[in-house]
Image (cartoon, grey):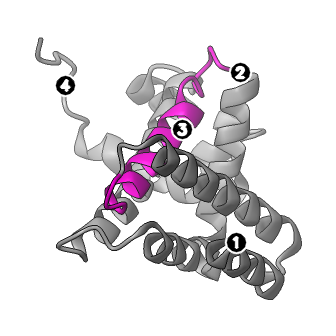
């Protein structure tokens, strides 16, 4: 059944982009409409009108963040004619994740992922699960024999390692140590 939801207006898209930029630097934990609206040159009433509610705005922001994540996955997939192997893709992912300019997006991701675990019925619902599925699908596409239980276990381990190293990097800013740990895992 086709969606009957109208496409977002240009104004809604513009405010979503501004709100997304704001949330990358300020986070979502204590998001308040009044300071957000002021920072993006709007008003709380306009945001409520365009997004329906604060939860609707948060859902739109999470969807917007996911667009960036999925674009990365598409870029990596498009570089290869054949599966490059899990180790190659994991190294590319780590390089992208660890870049300093990605830190705001990665902090946003960690916050949204954590909230999806503790508030699974709110605007965060399904965010954690869907990001796991997106990343596992990319890793699966990099494997020559992705259907075996061993291949599934390996990509799950790689994903867990990358996410753990990312959280550690965000907490400590120790790129050398976390990159060495990633490399050690991928060699082993």
- The image quadrant where one finds the C terminus is bottom right
Residue highlighted by disc 4: 6
Mark 3 neighbour class, 10 Å CA radius: few under 14, some 14 to 19, many 20 or more: some
Residue highlighted by disc 1: 185
Using the numbered discs, state the Cα–Cα distance from disc 1 to disc 2 in whole angstroms.
Answer: 32 Å
Q: Earlier in the sequence, mark 4 or mark 2?
A: 4
- Label 4 SS: loop
Residue 183 belongs to magenta span: no
Residue highlighted by disc 3: 43
Q: Is residue 116 above or below residue 141?
A: above
Residue 166 appearing in the image: yes
Using the numbered discs, state the Cα–Cα distance from disc 3 to disc 1 in whole angstroms.
Answer: 49 Å
Q: Residue at x 71, y 28 (%)?
A: 117
Q: Residue at x 34, y 70 (%)?
A: 76
Q: Residue at x 65, y 62 (%)?
A: 162
Q: Earlier in the sequence, mark 3 or mark 4?
A: 4
- Label 1 SS: helix
Mark 3 or mark 4: which is in front? 4
In the figure, is residue 118 to the left or right of 52? right
Q: Earlier in the sequence, mark 3 or mark 2?
A: 3
In the figure, is residue 110 to the left or right of 151? right
In the figure, is residue 59 to the left or right of 146? right
Which dot marks residue 119? 2
- Label 3 SS: loop
- The image quadrant where one finds the N terminus is top left
Instruction: Name the spot of residue 22 as percent of width and height, x first.
Output: 60, 56
Using the numbered discs, state the Cα–Cα distance from disc 4 to disc 2 in whole angstroms.
Answer: 28 Å
User: Are dots 3 and 1 in contact, CB under 8 Å?
Assistant: no
Q: Earlier in the sequence, mark 3 or mark 1?
A: 3
Residue 19 appearing in the image: no
Q: Which residues are magenta?
A: 120-145
User: Are dots 3 and 4 in contact, CB under 8 Å?
Assistant: no
């Amino acid at each position: 059944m086709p969606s009957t939801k109208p496409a977002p207006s240009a104004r809604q898209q513009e405010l979503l982009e501004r709100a997304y930029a704001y949330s990358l630097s300020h986070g979502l934990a204590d998001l308040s409409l009044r300071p957000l609206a002021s920072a993006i040159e709007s008003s709380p009433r306009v945001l409520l009108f365009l997004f329906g509610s604060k939860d609707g705005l948060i859902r739109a922001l999470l969807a917007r963040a996911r667009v960036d994540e999925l674009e990365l996955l598409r870029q990596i997939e498009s570089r290869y004619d054949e599966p490059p192997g899990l180790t190659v893709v994991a190294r590319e992912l780590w390089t992208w994740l660890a870049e300093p300019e990605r830190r705001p997006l990665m902090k946003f991701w960690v916050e949204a992922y954590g909230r999806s675990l503790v508030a699974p019925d709110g605007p965060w619902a399904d965010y954690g699960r869907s990001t796991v599925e997106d990343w596992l699908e990319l890793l699966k596409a990099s494997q020559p024999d992705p259907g075996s239980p061993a291949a599934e276990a390996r990509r799950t381990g790689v994903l867990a390692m990358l996410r753990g190293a990312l959280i550690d990097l965000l907490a400590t800013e120790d790129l050398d140590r976390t990159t060495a740990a990633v490399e050690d895992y991928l060699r082993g």
